[in-house]
Image: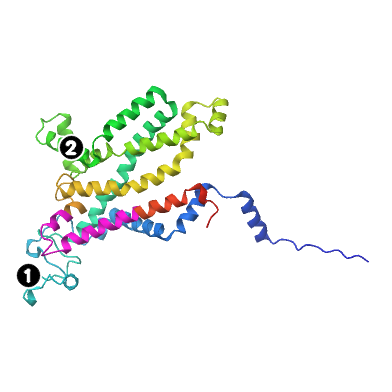
């Protein structure tokens, strides 16, 4: 007598799991899962998210208006600040610091609330963090893809333009641009383009020329990177197959080449964002950035540096905010680099 054995039937959950494994997952979903397993990248993403919320809801979060001056409260500080900076002796102990617990981080030399100005200053840094990549993507990707795909004389012409712009140190080039813009629009005739640009710059607190200066120099590195990536993929089989089926050049570039080179571009631009933020901070520090009373962390550091020996909180707190946002983008960029590396797919 023979006996037959039956394999146990699979449960619905096991069947669903097998179906999921059969279907697989997209590269972007796999990259996202690797990204959220990177603790430093998640910390950076959280810091960036909090700064975005702080910038968007600044009027609701800030305890005071950033430009409001109360001269009787100038250089005052809360009691807890004097405990972490021993040189800041309160007047009650024979020192020079006026204690005022109404200001969480203290007031500057014009009686403006430091916390409110730091909160509003996040808007400037984040705008620069997104404007720089915007110009880099629009200009750099267009130039790089045209040079890499068509090659020949067009490639030679576009890359020589990039080389000429690279001949100048980037920061020095931005400083020259800012100086030219500011002086050429200082006293223009009404009705001219210079008058319109100068008026718009003043209305935006000096942000327009900062954006133009950074935007005109942010695309060159992206153009070189895109060109190199396009050169590496333009002769791949899937591109040749698209040509054979009669796909147009714009369709090949946008539907077949660009999606396959996005990973390195995203990583490179995320890692470059701290550079844009540092440029704006430096320009504001030397007086070529945003104009008073618009708050910028760079200008706040410059104001606080003049009296850092007596009131270190006025320079160190905005410097800490700048430090955190720059490191957050660095952490996120490192995490994206690991997450978008195709060699890491399927590796925990």
Q: Is residue 245 magenta?
A: no
Mark 1 element type: loop
Classify 10 Å Cα crowding around label 1: few (below 14), some (14-19), many (20 and above): some
Q: Nearer the viewer, residue 215 or 58?
A: 215
Classify 10 Å Cα crowding around label 2: few (below 14), some (14-19), many (20 and above): few
Q: Nearer the viewer, residue 266 or 255?
A: 266
Q: Residue at x 27, y 31 (%)?
A: 164
Residue carrying label 1 = 96
Mark yes or no: residue 134 visible. yes
Whole-percent x and y of residue 257?
48, 35
Q: Main secondary structure of the magenta part?
A: helix
Residues drawn in magenta: 301-329
Q: Residue at x 48, y 26 (%)?
A: 249
Residue 65, relative to residue 276: is it above or below? below
Numbered badge on residue 176: 2
Whole-percent x and y of residue 270?
36, 47
Mark yes or no: residue 245 visible. no
Where residue 327 sits, quadrant-wise, is: bottom left
Whole-percent x and y of residue 75?
10, 64
């Amino acid at each position: 007598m023979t006996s037959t054995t039956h394999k146990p039937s699979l449960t619905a959950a096991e069947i669903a799991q097998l179906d999921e494994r059969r279907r697989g997952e997209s590269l972007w979903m796999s990259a996202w899962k690797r990204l959220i397993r990177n603790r430093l990248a998640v910390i950076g993403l959280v810091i960036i998210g909090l700064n975005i919320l702080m910038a968007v809801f600044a009027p609701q979060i800030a305890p005071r208006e950033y430009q409001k001056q109360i001269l009787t409260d100038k250089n005052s500080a809360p009691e807890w600040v004097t405990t972490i900076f021993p040189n800041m002796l309160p007047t009650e102990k024979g020192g020079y610091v006026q204690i005022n617990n109404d200001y969480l981080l203290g007031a500057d030399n014009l009686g403006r609330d430091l916390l409110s100005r730091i909160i509003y200053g996040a808007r400037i840094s984040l705008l620069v963090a997104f404007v720089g990549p915007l110009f880099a993507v629009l200009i750099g990707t267009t130039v790089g893809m045209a040079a890499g795909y068509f090659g020949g004389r067009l490639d030679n012409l576009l890359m020589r333009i990039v080389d000429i712009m690279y001949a100048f140190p980037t920061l020095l080039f931005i400083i020259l641009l800012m100086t030219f813009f500011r002086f050429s629009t200082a006293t223009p005739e009404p009705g001219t383009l210079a008058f319109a640009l100068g008026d718009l710059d003043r209305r935006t607190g000096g942000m327009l020329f900062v954006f133009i200066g950074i935007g005109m120099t942010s695309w060159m590195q992206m153009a070189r990177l895109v060109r190199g990536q396009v050169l590496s993929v333009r002769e791949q089989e899937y591109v040749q197959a698209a040509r054979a089926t009669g796909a147009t050049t714009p369709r090949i570039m946008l539907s077949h080449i660009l999606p396959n080179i996005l990973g390195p571009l995203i990583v490179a631009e995320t890692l470059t964002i701290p550079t844009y933020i540092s440029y704006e901070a430096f320009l504001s520090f030397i007086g070529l950035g945003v104009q008073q009373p618009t708050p910028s962390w760079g200008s706040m550091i410059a104001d606080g540096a003049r009296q850092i020996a007596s009131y270190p909180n006025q320079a160190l707190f905005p410097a800490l905010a700048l430090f955190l946002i720059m490191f957050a983008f660095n952490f996120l960029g490192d995490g994206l680099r690991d997450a978008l590396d195709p060699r890491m797919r399927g590796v925990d």
